[in-house]
Image (spheres, grey):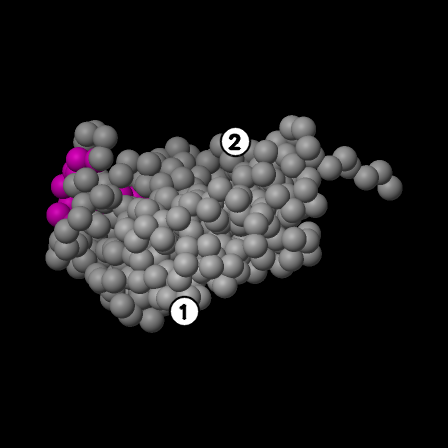
Amino acid sequence: MSGGRGGHGGPDARDIVFVVFDGVKMLDVTGPAEVFADAHRFGARYRLGYVSPTGMPVRTSVGLRLPVDGAAESAPDPDTVIVAGGDVLAERPVAPDLVGAVRELAARSRRVVSICTGSFALAAAGLLDGRRATTHWQHASLLARTRPLVRVEPDALFVEDDGVFTSAGVSAGMDLALALLEQDHGPELTRTVARDLVMFMQRPGGQSQFSATLERRPPRTPSLRTVVDLVAARPDLDHSAPALAARVGVSPRQLTRMFATELQSTPARFVEQVRLDHARALLADGHGVAQVATRSGFGSAETMRRTFVNRLGLSPSQYRARFGTTRRGAEPRRTP
């Protein structure tokens, strides 16, 4: 097995095996690998290896040839298996030899991880049946539709369910790698690695992927599109189902059916997501919590706080501390 930066790791090192294939997204491999290699440099003792279904080198998404250490069956029993993503996994059925490689390694590992569309390979291997999982938001509906036994959480950056970890697109794989590092070695080493790689200490797994709701294709029904555009433009208005329905001349029940059919959501859930996205953007821009609650339509800081905690796992103040700037509008610090 190759050790990447930091060498061989010694007999007590944790073996982390990356499963790669033709068309694999390069950052899905190198991003998490750099986290573990950096951790190894600071004393974490990881040993990195790379396998392909055939044992042959693969061609990555950026056209580079990626050497491997061999086929899956040649790898020692891994501590962690990481299945990288690639557009090919969402565009066509997962190749049987890749499914076999994932199953073979998973049966011998302590934990199994997928990055981005690598979740399609885990699902094809039956490893996500009955479990919660996520993937890149662009492919979440496809995963849910083609794998009904998987409980897809389209907004999450990463999800853990009984030793199986799945993450959203590309850079979220590095967030998940930091979470795994913290699980193995605690927060101090993880903070050191995050600083060295110029990363946030750890974005919470429940944090929503960027504007997932607003990036969806516009509704086909003109009246629903009008509602969606209004909510996005003015999240601070009264957007109860009766108020929205009245604006486009339909009944609340009819509006609810339209949301379910085209957006796979309810009016209330959609409005909450838009307000959450809007609030996140304002907080990241340095605006104060009370001001953001009003401008985003939450009405009160407490209502916004409950939504943030339920949806993201942290309060608005914590969110701003992690992701915010120090630009105008920020509330002044209180001195004791």
What residue does disc 1 label? Answer: 253
Whether residue 294 is visible, yes or no, is yes
Q: In screen coordinates, is 197 left or right of 321?
A: left
Question: Looking at the picture, how far across and down is residue 232, in whole percent?
Answer: 47, 45
Instruction: Identify the residue at image location x=17%, y=48%.
Output: 91
Query: Which image quarter: residue 330?
Result: top right
Does residue 57 belong to the magenta stretch?
yes
The magenta span reads 47-60
Instruction: Identify the residue at image location x=73%, y=37%.
Output: 331
The CA distance from mark 2 to mark 1 is: 49 Å
Label 1: which secondary element: helix
- Residue type pointed to by label 2: Val
Question: Looking at the picture, how far across and down is residue 294, in whole percent?
Answer: 65, 46
Q: Residues within 10 Å of mark 2 (few under 14, many from 20)?
A: few
Question: Looking at the picture, how far across and down is residue 61, in whole percent?
Answer: 22, 35
Query: Which image quarter: residue 79?
Result: bottom left
Which of discs 2 and 1 lies nearer the camera? The answer is: 1
Question: Looking at the picture, how far across and down is residue 82, in whole percent?
Answer: 32, 50
Label 2: which secondary element: loop
Which mark is first along the chain, 1 or 2? 2
User: In the drawing, what numbered circle is on residue 198?
Assistant: 2
Q: Please, is residue 3 above or below residue 223 in the view?
A: above
Q: Please, is residue 26 above or below residue 314 in the view?
A: above
Query: Answer yes or no: do the residues labelled 2 and 1 have beta carbons within 8 Å?
Result: no
Quadrant where the N terminus sits is top left
Residue positioned most to the right: 336
Quadrant where the C terminus sits is top right
Seen from the viewer's position, the closer of residues 288 and 246 is: 246
